[in-house]
Amino acid sequence: MNHLCFIVDDEPIAIEIIESYLLRLEGFSVAGTFTNPVKAFEALQHSRVDLLFLDIQMPGLTGLEFLQSLRRKPEVILTTAYREFALEGFELDVADYLLKPVSFDRFLKAIGKFHTRVQPATSLAPAKVPAANAEPPHLFVRADRKNVKVLLDDILYLESLKDYVRIATPQGKITTKETITHFEECLPPGRFLRVHRSFIVAKDKIGALAADGLEIGKTIIPVGRLYKMAVEKAVLGR
């Protein structure tokens, strides 16, 4: 699937950076770039756009005013140099908030959140016979000097080991140099749950919620005090 994108920012160099990042990805096309938010608003009335990169601080019409004026909103990733606008942006149900200057690594995390938000929507579409070559959901991680494919269905839990993360699967454990926060942002929240500062678990692999933690197979995963209420709600529905 090809996702069409608009980039709206009064700084041409900021547009160039986001556009260059999108060109490095498969499945994304830049359908239009605008330094004038009014022109962008007019273009959106006649164009199908999947993802909008929107600067907050623009002359004449701020990004938040722009967003509030849209009747049909595409997915939105806000960009700005001012961190204090983040809360208001998320109250408008945006996919993510990028603080300038935007690094490619942080940009990829935002794209991951976009994918997470659009996947549930596609699952509500009428059922179709899957293509013969359709691949199950997966991710690639760097381990043992190679990129290793990990099926999401195979993940039991993830454990943080300082600068590394260990991914437990029925086939064994894979250790990659990454942070647990990176995986929390990239994995679909409907399927995975942060239960501790050092652990993320696959919801469908939870066998029981015991006094000393979650049971996944023969492994007991501790539940952090700050995560206890969210875990009980996700597991027990309360």
Image (tube, grey):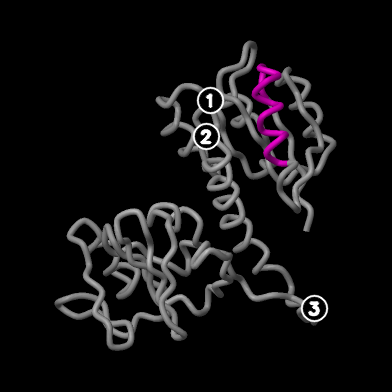
Against 9, residue 119 (above or below) is: below
Front residue of 144/184: it is 144
Q: Quadrant of the C terminus?
A: bottom left
Q: Residue 49: x, y in percent? A: 76, 42
Gap between marks 3 and 1 measured at Cα: 40 Å
Residue appearing at x 63%, y 30% in the figure: 54
In the rendered image, which residue does mark 1 sit on?
A: 80
Magenta segment main secondary structure: helix
Q: Residue at x 26, y 74 (%)?
A: 221
Sequence-first disc among 3 and 2 = 2
Label 3 sits on a secondary structure element that is loop
Residue 175 numbered mark, or none: none
Residue bearing mark 2 = 98
Dot 1: what SS?
strand
- At horizontal 66% and vertical 22% (from top left) the residue drawn is 9
Magenta residue span: 9-22
Q: Residue furthest front?
A: 145
Task: Tell me if residue 220 comes above or below residue 51 in the rendering.
Answer: below
Q: Taking 192 as reference, is 96 above or below it?
A: above
- Checking the image for residue 131, the label placed there is 3
Q: CA distance from mark 2 to mark 1?
A: 7 Å
Q: Residue furthest top?
A: 59
